[in-house]
Image: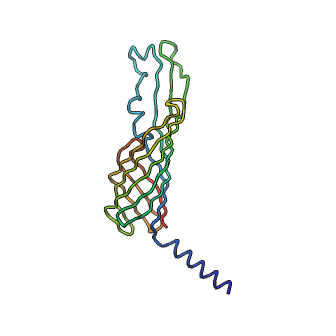
C-alpha cells in the first residue's frame, strides 16, 4: 500500500511540475547598468587634452552588467504581474590632474540594487512562443564611494519582450529603455 501511495504521489508531483502553470521565475543578465545614466556623460570627462584636464582630476565610469531575478504570476492569459530584483555594477576610475603626474590613483566599484514591481501585457500567447511588453517601476539603492549611499527611482519600459522554448523552461529577451538596463537575455522556469 505504501509503494502504491508513493508511486501515485510521485506521478502527481511529476505531472504538476511538467504542466504549464501561472507561476514564472527567471534569471537574466542585462546592461548597461544604470541604462547609460552614468557612462554616457562621463566616458571622456577629465581625460582629454583640454585645459580643464590639465589641472583637475578626471573620472571615468564604466557601466557593467546587471544580474536580475524575477517572478511573475498570470492573472489572465494576456496579463502577468510580479516583481524583479537586480544588482548592477559600475566601475569608476579616477586620475590625478595631468599637471600633477596623471597617475591613476583609484578604482572603485559602485553597486546598484533595484527592486521593481512589474506588469506584463502579452500580445501573442502561443505554447512555445510569446511576445509581450513590460513596464516596471520601483527603487534603486546605490552603494559605493562614487555616488554614495542614496535611493533613486527606478524605471524599465520594455515595449518588446520575447519568450521561447518549452512549456516549463524557456528563454527570454527584452529590449527597451529606462534607468536600470536597456536590453537583457535570460532563462526562466514556469510551473
**Lateral position of residue 104 relative to residue 73, left or right:** right
* Depicted 84 relative to depicted 149: above or below: below
What residue is drawn where x is 45% and y is 43%?
139
Q: Residue 18's spot in the image, x, y percent?
A: 50, 72
Rendered image quadrant of residue 56: top left
Image label count? 0
Rendered image quadrant of residue 129: bottom left
Residue 122 versus residue 167: which sits nearer the camera?
122
Q: Residue 32's spot in the image, x, y percent?
A: 43, 41
What residue is drawn where x is 41% and y is 28%?
42
Q: Colour scheme in the image?
A: rainbow
Residue farthest to the right?
Answer: 2
* Depicted 115 relative to depicted 125: above or below: above
**Lateral position of residue 146 relative to residue 43, left or right:** right
What residue is drawn where x is 36% and y is 67%?
77
Q: Residue 60's spot in the image, x, y percent?
A: 46, 28
Q: Residue 71's spot in the image, x, y percent?
A: 48, 57
Residue farthest to the bottom?
Answer: 1
Query: Which corner quadrant holds the N terminus?
Result: bottom right
Amino acid at each position: 500500500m505504501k509503494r502504491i501511495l508513493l508511486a501515485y504521489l510521485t506521478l502527481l508531483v511529476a505531472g504538476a511540475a511538467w504542466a504549464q502553470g501561472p507561476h514564472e521565475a527567471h534569471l537574466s543578465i542585462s546592461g548597461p547598468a544604470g541604462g547609460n545614466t552614468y557612462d554616457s556623460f562621463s566616458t571622456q570627462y577629465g581625460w582629454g587634452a583640454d585645459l580643464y584636464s590639465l589641472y583637475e582630476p578626471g573620472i571615468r565610469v564604466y557601466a557593467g552588467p546587471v544580474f536580475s531575478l524575477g517572478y511573475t504570476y498570470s492573472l489572465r492569459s494576456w496579463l502577468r504581474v510580479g516583481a524583479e530584483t537586480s544588482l548592477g555594477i559600475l566601475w569608476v576610475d579616477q586620475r590625478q590632474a595631468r599637471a600633477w603626474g596623471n597617475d591613476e590613483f583609484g578604482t572603485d566599484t559602485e553597486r546598484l540594487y533595484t527592486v521593481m514591481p512589474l506588469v506584463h501585457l502579452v500580445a501573442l500567447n502561443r505554447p512555445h512562443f510569446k511576445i509581450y511588453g513590460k513596464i516596471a517601476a520601483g527603487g534603486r539603492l546605490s552603494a559605493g564611494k562614487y555616488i554614495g549611499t542614496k535611493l533613486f527611482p527606478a524605471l524599465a519600459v520594455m515595449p518588446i519582450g520575447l519568450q521561447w522554448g518549452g512549456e516549463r523552461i524557456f528563454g527570454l529577451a527584452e529590449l527597451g529603455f529606462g534607468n536600470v538596463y536597456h536590453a537583457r537575455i535570460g532563462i526562466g522556469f514556469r510551473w
